[in-house]
Each structure stands twice: as C-alpha cells, then as structure tokens.
C-alpha cells in the first residue's frame, strides 16, 4: 500500500525495494502519539497565549516596541563610544585608587632629616599602640 502512494521518482530510481518486516528500535510510546484534534487544540492554545503576551507587551512597550531596544542616548555609535570611554576612565581611576594604599603618617620617614632617638621611640610607641 505504501508503494502505491509514493510518487514516481520520489525516492530516486532504486530498482528494488525489499519489505522484509525488519523491526527497528524506536521510542514511540502510545502516550506520545497525538491525534489531529489534540494537535489542533495545542496549536490553538499556543496561538491564544501568543496573542495574550503580544497584547501585554504592546501595553508595556507600544505597538512597535519589543522591549529590548537601546536607550536613545546609546542609539548612535559615536554616543556609545563616548559613554564607554567615560565609563572606562571611571573604572581606571577607581583601579588606580585601589592600588595605592594610604599609609599612616607615623610610617612615613622624613627624607631630608635624620630621626633623633627620641622621635624614633615616639614613632615606635605610636605603632605599638596602633597594633594593640
């Protein structure tokens, strides 16, 4: 019966077709089978949901909006590059500040004068009190 429904030349000119009843493993559970009515119902449900979601998005974004458009200030390439440059400069400034630790004043030795023993002892006392 199948061969009667196949148009001539559809499968190429094979010459011989063997139908020997060979069984092929498949995962076609009866519960997975769908009737025409079931498919039609599912498609109808999907189309209704699509229309509902489209209507909600039209209220949120307008009839021509999708919701994923760029803000106007980023719409042109030059404006985007300018904003990205500003953001990069801010990030570079923050990274520079994070790398340079602030040292407490007692840990910085004066460069032009030598420290007297009294000043050294005072600084050591400050350092010790800070670590306790």
Image (tube, grey):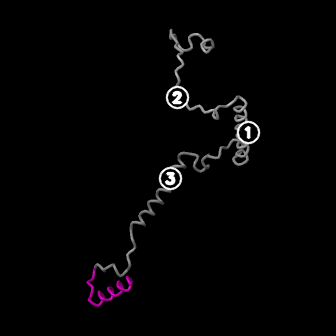
Q: Quadrant of the N terminus?
A: top right
Task: Quadrant for residue 114, please give it.
Answer: bottom left
- Closest to the camera, between mark 1 and mark 2, is 2
Q: Nearer the viewer, residue 69 or 37?
A: 37
Magenta region includes residue 114: yes
Main SS of the magenta segment? helix
Q: Residue at x 44, y 60 (%)?
A: 92
**What's the distance in space between the residues labelled 3 and 1, CA to CA?**
42 Å
Q: CA distance from mark 2 to mark 3?
A: 57 Å
Q: Which residue is mark 2?
A: 25
The picture places residue 110, in percent across and down from the top left corner, at 31, 80
Q: Quadrant location of residue 36?
A: top right
The relative height of residue 131 versus residue 80 in the rendered view (above or below) is below
Q: Identify residue for label 1.
A: 48
Where residue 109 is drawn, which disc sits there? none
Name which of mark 2 and mark 3 comes first in the sequence: 2
Please name the residue shown 29% across and 78% down the image: 111
> Where is residue 101 drawn, in percent x and y?
39, 71
Which residue: 53% across, 45% down?
77
Residue linked to disc 3: 84
Look at the image and give the residue range highlighted in magenta.
Answer: 112-132
Quadrant assignment for the C terminus: bottom left
Looking at marks 1 and 2 on the same chain, the residue that comes earlier in the sequence is marked by 2
């Amino acid at each position: 019966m199948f061969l009667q429904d196949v148009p001539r030349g559809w499968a190429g000119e094979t010459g011989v077709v063997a139908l020997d009843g060979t069984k092929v493993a498949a995962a076609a559970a009866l519960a997975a089978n769908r009737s025409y009515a079931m498919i039609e119902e599912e498609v109808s449900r999907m189309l209704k949901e699509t229309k509902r979601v489209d209507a909600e998005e039209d209220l949120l974004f307008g009839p021509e909006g999708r919701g994923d458009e760029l803000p106007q200030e980023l719409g042109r390439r030059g404006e985007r590059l300018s904003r990205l440059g500003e953001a990069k400069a801010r990030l570079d400034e923050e990274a520079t500040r994070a790398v340079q630790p602030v040292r407490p004043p007692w840990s910085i030795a004066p460069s032009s004068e030598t420290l007297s023993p009294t000043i050294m002892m005072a600084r050591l006392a400050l350092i010790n009190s800070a670590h306790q």
